[in-house]
Amino acid sequence: MKGEIIAVGTELLLGNIVNTNAQYLSQKMADLGIDVFYHVAVGDNMQRLVDTVRTSLNRSDIIITCGGLGPTTDDITKEGVSEALGVKLLPDKASIEKIKEIFKAYERPMTDNNIKQGYIPEGAIVLENNNGTAPGILVEKDDKIAILLPGPPNELYPMFEEKVLPYLKAKVHSTIRSRMLRVVGIGESAAEDMLKEIISSQTNPTIAPYAKDGEVHLRITAKTDNPEEADRLIVQMEQKVRSILGENIYGYDEESLEEVVLRLLQERKMTLSLAESCTGGLIANRLTDIPGASASLMCGIISYSNESKTNILGVKEETIRNYGAVSSQTAEEMAIGAKRVGNTDIGISVTGIAGPDGGSVEKPVGLCYIGISIGDKVKVHRLRFNGNRKRLKWNFSNRALDYLRRELLLL
Amino acid sequence: MKGEIIAVGTELLLGNIVNTNAQYLSQKMADLGIDVFYHVAVGDNMQRLVDTVRTSLNRSDIIITCGGLGPTTDDITKEGVSEALGVKLLPDKASIEKIKEIFKAYERPMTDNNIKQGYIPEGAIVLENNNGTAPGILVEKDDKIAILLPGPPNELYPMFEEKVLPYLKAKVHSTIRSRMLRVVGIGESAAEDMLKEIISSQTNPTIAPYAKDGEVHLRITAKTDNPEEADRLIVQMEQKVRSILGENIYGYDEESLEEVVLRLLQERKMTLSLAESCTGGLIANRLTDIPGASASLMCGIISYSNESKTNILGVKEETIRNYGAVSSQTAEEMAIGAKRVGNTDIGISVTGIAGPDGGSVEKPVGLCYIGISIGDKVKVHRLRFNGNRKRLKWNFSNRALDYLRRELLLL
């Protein structure tokens, strides 16, 4: 079964709002096993709306529109869809009564435009709106289904869950389930190269890699008649991928790297201090975005000046003089210093050049050292990335969290 | 001139990501005076992509695609658009060399897929990508313009601003100029109320307030035949607004609060240290996102544990015992401690409750104290916000930067 989502509203085309309804409805359709091949957004213009709906009805079995059901003259979705479907708009007594009641209850004056909301396409089912005045519409004609939903998410979500979901569940037979594997430490093309054979022989489940914020996310999607079978297929595929990518996979679905690191720290009852130079507080900020971070993260030192590296973290002046602030030696002493100052089990340090200035041939922009001090051991990793300042900070922070994750897995 | 935005990527149709690029590009097109009549999202499927691009080229003068320019076999935008336009894809020596160089410089293995990124449609202009490996493409054919941009916003935004905007500006004729005034410290409805008369009598230029990240952004837009007249109208309107909002206006256009604060510090040759508790490094992270921050920001202490507040910042144990870690007294000692530890002119502190746990009736989630120590003076501000953890961290950090800004204006 093929579905399509049509958002109606000039405010989308002006960039005033972002089309979050398309995302919400797509997730719901995917869960139902309905393939969504297109999203379209069109303005409050009758001719373009009718053209769009006609095209969509030609290529899809189900169209879902959102927006344009309100009382103003701009709201033309019902009219446009009816024309494209070739059905008449007729007054619906029950809907008109309900609208009248709402206005009476809220002591608001009612206009002719409000009455317009009580007209529905011939043969349609009215989807009651418990969170606004515009009812939704569901109409079937010639093996096609058109579902018209209001635009505001607080009206659309409950109407979809309560009215549309049960209807669609009865219509569809197959199930789509998916799982995202989150990979860090290797690039997108390297990951694809390692998974080449699996990807080229994929049928069901499918596997699709995409790059996001310095990570690779692999989506495994299975389509079958029943959820248990879909889950079994996904687990099988995950095992195959895991046998190749191993610990490069750090998490599932929406789980972030900082969440995984904090979970591992909590499981091991270990505490952490940070010494950040070039990342400038980004690692601390990412960790403290997670509720409960205070159980593991004790403190962070953003030692931007050399003076703060020596005064607060106890990096030796001669180390900076002999090797530079961006060096393996400084990273090592920073990590040890962070652990000591914070009185924690682990100290992590990052020192590098985020640019755009400050690079040299020997130490270019994008160079970074990450130190990890655990117990009486210290490791330092050397890295190079490209990108602008924010990108570099992000990639440095991601690798620091990843190195910590890998160390924690060994404990 | 009519434009259209085509997002390419199955992850959109599965609802994994929301199409924020369409919003960004729509705003930019509206600023240019280019009408956007449609947004389309299509998956990584060649036939549907080619069909979509053909339809769009039929009804629009300019199409902008985003996504699908990466190195994997899923990335088919260049191939699809070339087929729809009827142009060949040819290897571009310069692009291929550049990709090879990147991989060499960053000591990464290169695959055949990476070379694919160096092929471009015949006659196209290559838009250099300074934030990733996939170059953008601009191709004109038969009075139509196709612009292919990478999907990740951190690559798309700068490429659009630096490469596409100047090109499109030269293509469009009527002049639309706009200026954004950035306001902090008062809410959207308060700002709108203060500007009520101006807003209700607006014609040209228009003025529109938007709430964004705890700030209010006022966009003044003038539309005329020549740039000088437009600029004159904007300056006039700005003076009117400024006479009402005064120092609540902190900056223009893309200028961020952290940029303004760093500029003021540099102008006054003053240095800064931070003591962050509930903001967890966010203030430091925001400041260090700005190139050259190291000239003013010497260090930050993220004193998440009470121990780190006393050990590193020298907050008295009895202060925390008697008044609590979230108190005016602790904020004061933290600010003084930051200034002393960092050996700087100014110390800023933030201590509060970001939630979701840790609140009480007396000290609810959303309560925050901000301390500012300059010379031998200390001020503490008490604040309350509502929202989730990330939202609260953001609002706390914004107010801390704003209080600092207002202090700096007095010096």
Image (cartoon, coloured by chain):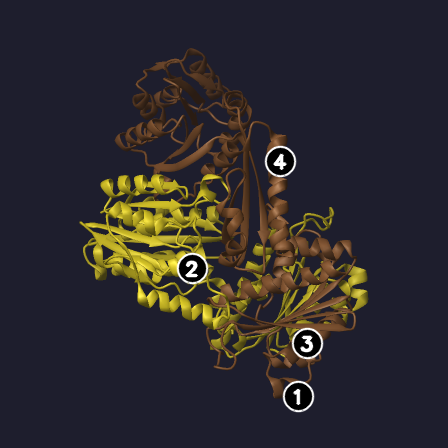
Chain colours: A brown, B yellow
Q: Chain of mark 1?
A: A
Label 1 near label 2: C-beta < 8 Å? no
SS of the residue under disc 4: helix
Point out residue A198 in the picture as x, y percentages from the top left corner.
Answer: 53, 47
The three-letter amino acid code for the residue at tag 4 is: Asp
Q: Is residue A133 above or below residue B134?
A: above
For the residue pair B233 and A10, the one nearer the viewer reads as A10
Point out residue B218 in the picture as x, y percentages from the top left corner.
Answer: 39, 53
- Determine which residue is flagged by label 3: A332
Point out residue B91 in the picture as x, y percentages from the top left corner.
Answer: 31, 61
Task: Say whether mark 2 and mark 4 are on the same chain.
Answer: no
Tell me the mark number nearer the camera, choosing from 2 and 3.
2
Q: Is residue A183 left or right of residue A65?
A: right
Tell me the mark number nearer the camera, choosing from 3 and 1.
3
Tell me the mark number nearer the camera, choosing from 4 and 1.
4
As measured in the structure, the alpha-carbon distance from the residue carrying label 2 to the one carrying label 1 is: 47 Å
Which label belongs to residue A231?
Answer: 4
The three-letter amino acid code for the residue at tag 3 is: Glu
Residue visible at 44% across and 69% down? B102
Quarter occupied by the C terminus of chain A? bottom right
- Determine which residue is flagged by label 1: A318
